[in-house]
Amino acid sequence: MIFSEDDFFFLPLGGSGEIGMNCYLYHFNNSWVMIDLGVTFGDSLISPNELIMPKLDFIFENNIKLDALILTHAHEDHIGAVPYLFDKIKDIPIYTTSFTASVLKRKFQSNNINEFKINLLDYNKKKKIGGFEIEILALTHSIPEPNGVILKTGEYKVFHTGDWKIDPNPLVGKPIDEEKLRLLGDQGVDLMVCDSTNVFNENPSGSEKEVREAFKQIFSEKKVGTIVVTCFASNVARLETILKVSEEFNKVCLFLGRSIHKIYESATENDYLINQKNIINEKDLKSVSNEDVVLICTGSQGEPNAALSNLVNDNNKNIKLSKNDLVIFSSREIPGNEKKINKLKEKILKIGCEIYDQNTRMVHVSGHPSKKELKKMYKWINPNTIIPVHGEYRHLNEHKKFARSCGIKNQILVQNGDLVLIKKDDQSKIIKKVNFGRNILKGKQILPLNHQIFENLKILNSDGEIFINIIMNLDDEIIHEPVIFTSTISIDIEDLEDLKEFIITEINSISQNCIDDNILKNDLKKKVKSFFKKRIGLKPFTNFEIVRL
């Protein structure tokens, strides 16, 4: 693909048409920069524990040399793919703020990557990168140091928001830089690429200060039993809220979950949470009464191997939940996780614990902008054109309509793979669809979503698998009855014996006409699937092995 040197392009490879897996490219003056490189998680068709990340084939197929990877903040859906794709992008300079760098450093180390360099960016300081002048500014979100990115070219100015909301009392980290945003708007912004996650919410997302007051009220009410709080590990402000409120009520806190420990290390490394003295380890529990303990757990999304699930399933040898305990879900439900979360809550209720969540108490506020916050940002920035990102199609479409109703001149609904040519006034448009897609981390391998193995896994998950071994001589005679094994299909002895006779009859019928054993196996697979479909209503994944003696 040939690019004109002066063409200014925007291209999402992830995060547009879905929640998560954010990855965005900008081109100008023969220079490319990438903003964010995140992951999302599996759905009902794929193991929910498997990471899904953007395919970068467009970059490699076009021999594109990226001048920078700029990371807006440390959430998984913005940085999670970096360690897994590092061998392909390790020559690309990485730029971000100090806290995000600390989190990413630990991800590298967990993946046995020891040779890396992360360049630090400072707020409101311009930096020349390739054909762009880059500057970051402070926003507020549910993690420290979220930043918007300003990209300036010869005649264009773009504001890429990343994730944000307007928190008047952020408690942890810098407040949103309203003065800088207003100044940016006064200077003129050609394009704003903006978060759409909460576009269906009418009212402001709320402040962490409100959550802190709600926790104080809950702690004052709870006189008996242990308080358990599950939240996103990366929500440092929420961790501080729990720690400070616990200290106020003379309670100690115990972190459960590896990711919380890692975030705590990154936080203290950057002078967050440094004055908290009421953190204990599991060995100290014996000397503390249940009423004086607050457990802070991973697993708010119902993850089966996370700390909360281990507690609920009695897999923690040091801690057991009892009917006097209170479990607080201090997080939102990520779309697609509702069933897992409800199943976990059902188990908690059966133990006898009480449950609070954002539907019953003010125990969580979102990190994304509602319509009122979007409208305020539009007023500050006053962009000529807006491209909604960070959302499924319905989010992007609603954001486009809302921006139009607020007086934004031009709105472009863009999905992954849409290459947008940015022009002045209302001339920006999608000019073509490029190669994009998803890769999945399967063990230590990164495989494309359309790999045959995933099609096979779908069959296994729905119809099961069967192994059939045939022993024949060189004259196509069966010298032993078929050996059949399956652990994923319920088949009775009568059906099993009928299947053996069926296979023998088919081999005697077709083996003389088959050129080789591969053709014979393929024919037998089709016939065995047909047999199972008639008998038990399933078409299992069928493995044939023919041994010649």
Image (cartoon, rainbow, N blue to C red):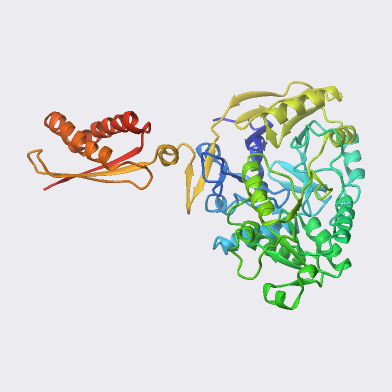
The answer to which of 253 and 134 lies nearer the viewer is 253
x 86%, y 25%: residue: 406
Residue 515 in sight here: no
Q: In the figure, residue 272 lies in which quadrant?
A: bottom right
Compared across the picture, whether 439 is left or right of 201 comes to left
Task: Describe residue 289's horizontal placement relative to residue 14 as left or right.
Answer: right
Choose between 212 and 267: the one closer to the eye: 212
- Report whether 124 appears left or right of 151: right
Look at 75% across and 66% down and name the residue there: 269
- Residue 529 visible somewhere in the drawing: yes
Position of residue 444 relative to residue 520, above or below, is: below
Please tell me whether residue 440 is drawn above or below residue 513 in the rendered image. Answer: below
Percent across and percent down for residue 292 are: 80, 70
Viewer-proximal residue, 266 or 347? 347
**x, y percentage for residue 39?**
61, 46
In this view, the residue in front, 345 or 116, is 345
Quarter holding the N terminus is top right
Is residue 480 placed above or below 435 in the rendered structure?
below
Q: Which residue lies furthest to the top in this view?
A: 426
Instruction: Residue 31: give x, y in percent of width and height.
Output: 65, 40
Horizontal and vertical percent for residue 367?
Answer: 79, 45
Instruction: Establish if 430 lies above or below 518.
Output: above
Residue 418 image-quadrant placement: top right
The image quadrant of residue 257 is bottom right
At 85% from the left edge and 52% from the top edge, which residue is drawn?
211
- The residue at the far left in this view is 475
Count of marks, rendered view: 0
